[in-house]
Image: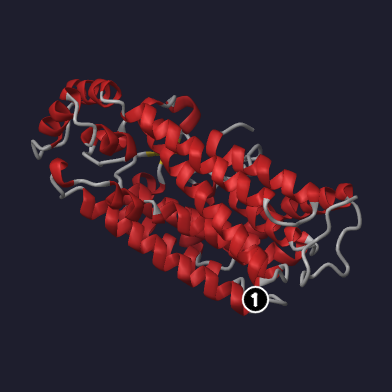
């Protein structure tokens, strides 16, 4: 007996078999790069140039890169699949998928500036190449483009816009909490502080799920389940990303390792080490509370202390736990089986870089 699409979904006109569902979703996903470029064409020429460079479509002189990779488009894929989970054609969420990729790239432009990250996708970040003011303004323009994608989408466009606006508030809260955390003494840091910081990740993924569900005509129960799963994926990914920042391969991440630790950010492995009550954790607190940016020798010592205090192990286990919670949430709700399987695979890709 086949599992049915949820009641109250926009099933009429949707793909009729699991293979049709996956083919339709893959086809819609294939349209995203072109739609993103078309959206960016609406910008002022100077903003288009920075955007094209940031997205990887062009070099610093504005010359097209013919072999440019479209990237994994994880947020677009999540948005499309959440529409398909409601039994709707995934194409109904194309506007939402474009919007979420635009929001994601807006956050990258601004995050690189806030974090002083000089590399993005294995080359100088946009703010290094074009200057901080131009990168900031380009990010502002891109978020405006994102907001313009949704109001005319039917059905559910206005509802999806509300979801997106709520996520932007969450993004801001998370970024603010992260900056505030840098000023808190190591002895006063708690896991609650980390939960506030994680909003910068969970808000965006939850919005992808919510926007896709709204545009797919999902009922409130399915929409809430998809967003809950996405929040847990976000928590799992943030924990995994914090581990990757310290111990990851820069050839894979496209960024320098230990950037957060070097600048004194208290990411999850660091917080776990500080809260461990171990000698290594106490020594780490003394090192971080010196009030100066860590030198390379100090960074190496901090990495050793975080691992010795169990910070890495804690973050890896917590990431796995959140991912499992997200997968369990999927299993507990009715949706097209092929879509459920694709969502589970996507969750693993987001958290584990397993694709």
x then y, percent, for residue 201: 44, 52
Evaluate whether residue 255 shows in this view: no
x then y, percent, for residue 181: 22, 50
Rendering quarter of residue 276: top left
Query: Is residue 334 rendered to the left or right of residue 250?
Result: right
The residue singled out by tag 1 in the image is 157
Q: Is residue 288 above or below residue 92?
A: above
Which part of the image, by quadrant, shows the C terminus? top right
Residue beneath the point at 16% across and 41% down: 186
Residue beneath the point at 63% across and 58% down: 36
Label 1: how many Cα within 10 Å (few below 14, some 14–19, many 20+): many
Q: Is residue 177 above or below residue 233?
A: below
Query: Is residue 70 rendered to the left or right of residue 336?
Result: left
x then y, percent, for residue 130: 37, 50
Residue beneath the point at 38% across and 45% down: 129
Q: Using the image as rendered, state which of residue 161 and residue 253 is in the foreground.
A: 161
Q: Is residue 263 above or below residue 49?
A: above
Evaluate whether residue 100 shows in this view: yes
Q: Using the image as rendered, state which of residue 24 and residue 347 is in the foreground.
A: 347
x then y, percent, for residue 257: 35, 29
Q: Using the image as rendered, state which of residue 57 and residue 7 is in the foreground.
A: 7
């Amino acid at each position: 007996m086949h599992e049915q699409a949820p009641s109250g979904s926009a099933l009429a006109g949707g793909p009729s078999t699991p293979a049709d569902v996956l083919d339709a979703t893959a086809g819609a996903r294939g349209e995203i790069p072109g739609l993103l470029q078309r959206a960016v064409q609406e910008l002022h020429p100077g903003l288009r140039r920075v955007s094209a460079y940031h997205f990887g479509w062009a070099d610093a002189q504005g010359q097209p890169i013919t072999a440019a990779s479209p990237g994994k488009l994880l947020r677009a894929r999540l948005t499309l699949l959440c529409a398909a989970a409601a039994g709707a054609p995934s194409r109904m969420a194309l506007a939402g998928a474009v919007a979420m990729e635009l929001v994601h790239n807006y956050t990258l432009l601004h995050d690189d500036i806030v974090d002083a990250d000089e590399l993005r996708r294995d080359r100088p970040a946009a703010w290094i190449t074009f200057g901080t003011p131009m990168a900031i303004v380009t990010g502002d323009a891109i978020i405006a483009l994102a907001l313009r994608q949704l109001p005319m989408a039917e059905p559910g466009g206005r509802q999806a816009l509300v979801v997106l606006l709520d996520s932007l508030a969450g993004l801001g809260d998370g970024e603010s909490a992260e900056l505030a955390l840098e000023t808190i003494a190591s002895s006063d840091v708690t896991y609650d502080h980390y939960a506030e910081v994680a909003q910068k990740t969970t808000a965006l993924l939850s919005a992808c799920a919510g926007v896709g569900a709204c545009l797919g005509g999902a009922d409130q129960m399915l929409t809430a389940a998809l967003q809950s799963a996405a929040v847990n994926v976000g928590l799992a990914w943030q924990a995994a990303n914090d581990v990757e920042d310290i111990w990851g391969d820069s050839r894979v991440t496209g960024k320098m390792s230990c950037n957060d630790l070097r600048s004194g950010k208290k990411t999850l492995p660091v917080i776990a080490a500080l809260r461990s009550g171990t000698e290594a954790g106490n020594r780490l607190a003394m090192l971080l509370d010196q009030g100066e940016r860590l030198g390379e020798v100090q960074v190496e010592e901090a990495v050793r202390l975080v691992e010795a205090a169990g910070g890495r192990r804690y973050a890896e286990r917590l990431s796995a736990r959140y991912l499992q919670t997200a997968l369990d949430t999927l299993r507990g709700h009715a949706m097209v089986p092929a879509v459920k399987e694709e969502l589970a695979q996507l969750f693993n890709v987001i958290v584990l870089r397993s694709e």
